[in-house]
Image: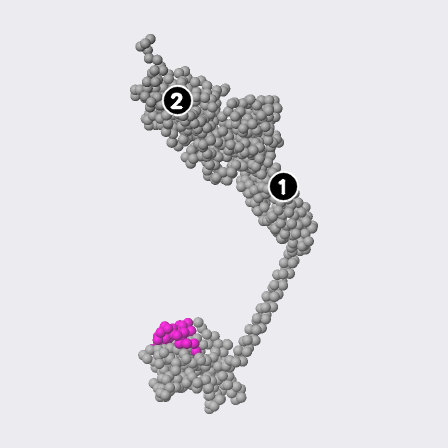
Amino acid sequence: MAAETPPTQHRSSCSSSSCYLHRRLPLLHLALLHIIFFFFLCSSFPAVSRAQMPGFLSIDCGGGANYTDARGLRWTSDAALIATGTPISTLNTSTSTSTQEQEQETQYTTLRAFPSDGAKHCYALPVATRARYLLRATFLYAGFDGDDAFPEFDLYLGATRWSPIVVYDGARLVTREAVVLAQSASISVCLSNATTGRPFISTLELRPLNGSLYRTDAEARAFLALAARINFGAPSPDPVRYPDDPYDRIWESDMVRRANYLVDAAPGTVNVSTDKPVFVATSERPPEKVMQTAVVGTLGELTYRLNLNGFPGDGWAFSYFAEIEESVVPETRKFKLFIPGLPDVSKATVDVGENAPGKLRLYQPGYYNVSLPFVLSFAFRKTNDSSRGPILNAFEIYKYVAIEPGSPDALAMASLASRYSSFGDWANEGGDPCWPSPWSWVRCSSEPQLRVVSINLSGKNLTGSIPPELVALSFLAEIRLDDNMLTGPIPDLAASSNLSIIHFENNQLTGSVPSYLSSLPKLTELYLQNNKLSGYIPKALKSRGIVFSYAGNMDLKAGNQEKHHLIIIISALLGVSLLLAVSLCCYVLTRKANKKNSPPEDDLTKAPPPAHKLQKSDAPSCEIATETCHPFRLCDLEEATKNFENRIGSGGFGIVYYGKLPDGREIAVKVPTNDSYQGKKQFTNEVSLLSRIHHRNLVAFLGYCHEDGRNILVYEFMMNGTLKEHLHGVTSTSAGFSDLRLQRIQQKGSSTCTADARRRSSTGTSRRATSCWTSRCGPRCRTLGCRSWSQRNHTRPPTSVARLATWIHSTTSLSS
């Protein structure tokens, strides 16, 4: 006993510092426990510290208020999204038994039910165009209607039948999920075609997805409808979802057993798990919590059988593997997939350690397009060189649902309805205007395709102009817009050739009655009364024999519009004719005034056109038109005049010789004398002028010769001589004219051919005209043009013919 040391002695024998630490140790333990408990609380409520992902939309159908649930998801009432249906609470229903999870979630305590009237009831969810979304709808019946028959109806995505909703158990939650690529700014979810009971819905959820998730080549033509998404090796029946899955996918536990779902599991199937992090950054990004659990076939095989909702059909199927089992010695895990009846589906050997690569890393082999049956049986079997049995962490299976285009008029009708969205529930029915059932104010045809054929918006208090969207509805047969407050003109509906009934009465429409209405081949009724239309009614419209009412339009006339138009046209023509007559009179008076101030009509001495318009070079043959004057050769003229033997006259220009051409024509050839001064340029100008002037009182100019420096002119020969010879000659003429008559003829010829003396003196040139007589005793002037002053007069420079003004009588014609 003495040898024992009492405890009190032992405690008293310790040093002061060690005793102080020993006394404070329980307090330190308590503080440490508080810190651990605090971190435990933080980890137990992750939703409190995590914000909801942007773009999440959670709708509590039938709910009365907005709230945030235990996961951190914000729920909103559907009251602002739909105007039909009735909110119903399921808390006190006789079959409101549900799972523990459902009892804790407020959104499953209410629902919205709709009448079984054959109409569709739609939610329009706002989305971003060309973005990919996960869309989820849930249905918890809970016996809300007290009916013995469970409800059965259809769920639609726009005009596409998404899935039938069939309730077998009032306490079981029915869920439908789809991955959808938004084609427009909204997605319509509709309930319709109830065969038993009333259509209803509990929740609608919309989750934006990352750009790489569930991307397929066919997403513009088909969406993915979920058939199965299973978390294998789960520690509890609770699903894994947000916030463990940032995209709020629901991964159902493999512990949930129901008929024909995950049955026929192979013997030796065990659960394995790890708390170590698993790398999951692949294209579909399954949550890490799902990849930390798995099932393993310890006997070398994993087998399951389940019914796939919506199948048979083409689907999208992927499996998720990660090596999470620890091993002391190096081991291998290799296996293959086998599906009875589908040998081609089996893929190459899966080597998790090599394909991943390594442990705790995700590997996701799968099929982007595979044909699967409704009852799917599959097996994973290890290969002969594998030391471990197959492993499976999770898988997903979706079915491709082809997108129905619906009515081609859907866009125009959606635009029309949005124009009046605040005018009543009728403008917010949503979905396709024709399918699966038409809007309440629309009638559609189904052959050969869905088209809007009738619109009835009578008495809807519509304002503004007639909707322009009507122009795009080319299959319309009936329009009823009466008893509204519409204004503006009647639009052009000529493209709607099937129109037979038009009711626009009792509005405030203005403008005229369009003429195209009379050309509508099937029109039978047209009501336009009590508007503010004006103008004339088309005659063809009144003669059609249709039911036509237009009373009450004060400014609309029933007269003949065509006659009115004819009067306008005749008046316009008379006005134009009067204007033309006045213009013509002014022109004639102006011409007469100009003639009074002009020289006498036979004055040919006005200056000819400028020289640059008559010649282009010094060679006459280059600028004189050969069709009006002929260039003679000198040898031909010598032969015709017998070497200039027969002289018949002379003048200031030179000597005139008689000649006869080989064809018998008689000519007068004027050859200049040496003292007659005329340069090459002057000769060219004179020939050009003579060749272009033709007059009944002028001797015909036949041609010229310009060789060896000689300038020769050739004229028509006048066989009866000159006027002088007839007046003063020694022989009498056979014409028998009196002297007075001959003097008058000579005066006329002189006025035609002789230049005004005063003008000649002003231009520095002078020439005497000579009158000749034809075989019919008609006078002709044989000399035209002006002669330069004598070469001997050097006090003034010679003047070219081109500078002299020559006035031509109106009967004179100029060749080109």
From the top left corner, tell me how far across and down residue 586 is, in percent.
Answer: 57, 73
Towards the viewer: 740 or 470: 470
From the top left corner, tell me how far across and down residue 178 is, in percent.
Answer: 48, 31
- For numbered disc 1, what is the local secondary structure? strand
Quadrant of the snapshot with the N terminus: top left
Magenta highlight on residue 634: yes
Q: As displayed, is residue 429 above or below residue 307?
A: below
Mark 2 packing: few (<14 Cα in 10 Å), some, or many (20+)? few
Image quadrant of residue 397?
Answer: top left
Q: Residue at x 40, y 24 (%)?
A: 27
Q: Name the residue beneath numbered marker 2.
A: 26
Q: Name the residue beneath numbered marker 1.
A: 456
* Magenta segment boundaries in residue numbering: 608-636
Q: In the rendered structure, which amino acid carries the disc numbered 1?
A: Asn
Q: As displayed, is residue 625 above or below residue 327?
A: below
Image quadrant of residue 703?
Answer: bottom left
- For numbered disc 2, what is the local secondary structure? helix
From the top left corner, tell me how far across and down residue 48 is, in percent.
Answer: 47, 31
Q: As displayed, is residue 699 above or below residue 199?
A: below
